[in-house]
Amino acid sequence: MSTITDTLRSNWAVMISGTGSNLSALLDLDPVLSVGLVISDKKNAYGLSRARRRGIPTYHFENNDWDDLQNQLKRYLIDYIFLAGFMKICPENFLKNWSGRIFNVHPSLLPTYPGLKSIERSFNDKAPMGVTIHEVTPAVDKGLILLQRKIVSTDTLESSEFQIHISEHRVVRRVFECYKK
Ligand code: GAR
C-alpha cells in the first residue's frame, strides 16, 4: 500500500558499472529516497546484487542500445538519473531527454582531472583532491557543478582513495536529499 511519503518521493534510476558502493550509500538513505531501477552495463556488477537483495528492479544495459534504455526509464516512470560509477559516455541524443535531471559523481575536484584514473593522477601530481557532483552534459565531466568536497591530503594512494570514497558517499546522499520532491 502506498503512503503519502511514497508519493512525495522522486523516482531515481541509478546507473553503475561496478562495485556500487555509492549505490549502497544511497540505498541506506531510505525512506527519503526511492530508487526505482538500477542499471548496469556489466552483467556481473556487484552493485546489481546489492539492488536485487533490496528487491529493486535491475536492467542490464547492453549493445549500446540507448533507445531501449530510454524505454525502460519510461516504463519505470523515472524522474532523475544518477551515474554512480557508470563508465560509459552517454550520447547527446539520450541526454537531451534528461537535461537537468541526470547527475554524476566524479572522484576529483573538477574541472581538474576529468576522465579516467582521476584519483591516481591527482595523487601523483600532489594536487588538491576531492569529489564533485555535476550535471551530465554531452561535454564529458563539464556539466554544471552542484557540489564539491575537498579531502585532506594523505601520504598514500590507498588512504586517499579511501577518503575519496567516504566523501563520495556523503555527497551523493546530500544531492539526493536536495532533490526529493
Ligand atoms: C567512484 O569513485 C566514482 O566516483 C567513479 O567510479 C567509482 C565507482 O565506485 N566514477 C568515475 O570515475 C566516473 N568518471 P562504486 O561502484 O563503488 O560506487
Image (tube, rainbow, N blue to C red):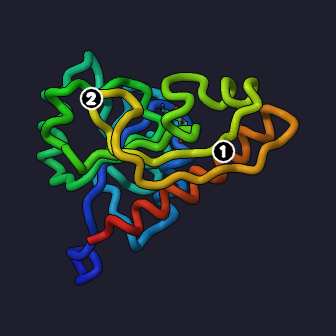
Q: Nearer the viewer, residue 76 or 32?
A: 32
Disc 1, SS:
helix
Report the side of 139 relative to 158 (left or right).
left
Of 4 and 48, the residue lying toward us: 4
On residue 124, the disc is none
Q: Depth check: 1 or 153 in front? A: 153
Identify the residue shown where x is 20% and y is 52%: 78
Residue mark closest to the camera, 2 vs 1: 2
Q: Residue at coordinates 73% horizontally, 25% vertically from top-left?
A: 125
In the image: residue 87, left or right of residue 117: left
| Residue 98 higher or lower than 120, as above or below | below
Percent of width and height locating residue 67: 13, 28
Name the residue at the right extreme.
Answer: 155
Q: Amino acid at mark 2?
A: Pro
Q: Residues within 10 Å of mark 2 (few under 14, many from 20)?
A: some
Task: Count the labels in the image.
Answer: 2
Return the residue at label 2: 138
Residue 137, relative to residue 41: is it above or below? below
141 or 90, which is in the foreground? 141
Q: Would you say the beta carbon of the disc 1 residue lies within 8 angstroms of ligand 1? A: yes
The numbered mark at residue 164 is 1
Quarter of image, res 113 = top right
Q: Is residue 136 above or below residue 125?
A: below
Q: Which residue sits at x=29%, y=80%?
A: 5
Question: Where residue 12 sits: x, y (%)?
Answer: 30, 54
Residue 100: percent from left, percent from top: 23, 49
x 41%, y 42%: residue: 104
Q: CA distance from mark 2 to mark 1?
A: 25 Å
Mark closest to the chain's N terminus, 2 or 1: 2
- Placement of 9 over or under 123, stated as above or below: below
